[in-house]
Amino acid sequence: MLRFIVPALAGLVLLVPSAGADDNKAKKKKPDLDAIFSKIDANKDGKLTPAEFAGALAEIKKKKDGEQPKQAANGKGAKKAAELFTKLDTNKDGTLSLDEFKKLPEVMKEMKKKKDK
């Protein structure tokens, strides 16, 4: 009986703080795109190249799936990174500015909707 009560209480504890704090919940869900951009921008020139962008996505995939970044960057991951980069690069200058990068969640949501159809 105790086996079932402890997990239920743990779940309740996790739910209670967010139940009355919608502002905190929204803040936690939004990633700090400024900080992410800064971390990805390897040469600190204020722009992301396709290589910097693809490298970051490969690292994310590596952490998520346990793959080597080079393997992820050469397969489907590279194609998806290139497609995503192209959609984000609205001025078509071959790099992503911070403002373009900040559209990432919106563009990813659009791509997911198209994929689901």
Image: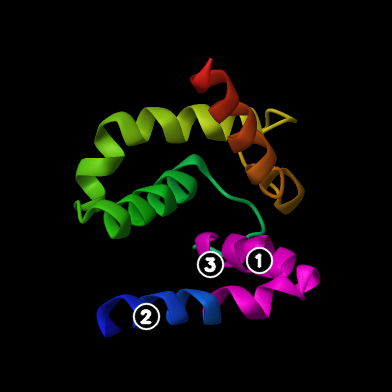
- In this rendering, does residue 31 appear at all? no
Residue that appears at 42% across and 30% down = 80
| Nearest to viewer (mark 2 / mark 3) | 2
Q: Quadrant of residue 41?
A: bottom right
Residues shaded magenta: 14-41
40 and 18: which one is in front? 18
Q: Which residue is mark 3?
A: 39
Label 1 vs 2, first from the N-terminus: 2
Q: Secondary structure at mark 1?
A: loop
Residue that appears at 64% across and 45% down = 105
Residue 61 pos. (x, y %): 33, 50
Q: CA distance from mark 1 to mark 2?
A: 36 Å
Residue that appears at 27% across and 80% down = 1
Residue 12 pos. (x, y %): 53, 76
Horizontal side of 94 relative to 6 (left or right) equals: right
Residue 4 pos. (x, y %): 31, 75
Residue 52 pos. (x, y %): 46, 51
Q: Which residue is mark 1?
A: 32
Can residue 83 be found in the magenta stretch? no
112 and 77: which one is in front? 112
Vertical side of 26 occupied by 16: above or below: below
Q: Quadrant of residue 18?
A: bottom right
Q: Secondary structure at mark 2?
A: helix
Disc 2 packing (10 Å; few <14; some 14–19; many ≥20): few
Horizontal side of 72 relative to 117 (left or right) equals: left
User: Most extreme residue toward the top, as rendered?
Assistant: 117
Q: Which residue is mark 2?
A: 5
Label 2 vs 3, first from the N-terminus: 2
Q: Main secondary structure of the magenta part?
A: helix
Disc 1 packing (10 Å; few <14; some 14–19; many ≥20): few
- In this rendering, does residue 78 appear at all? yes
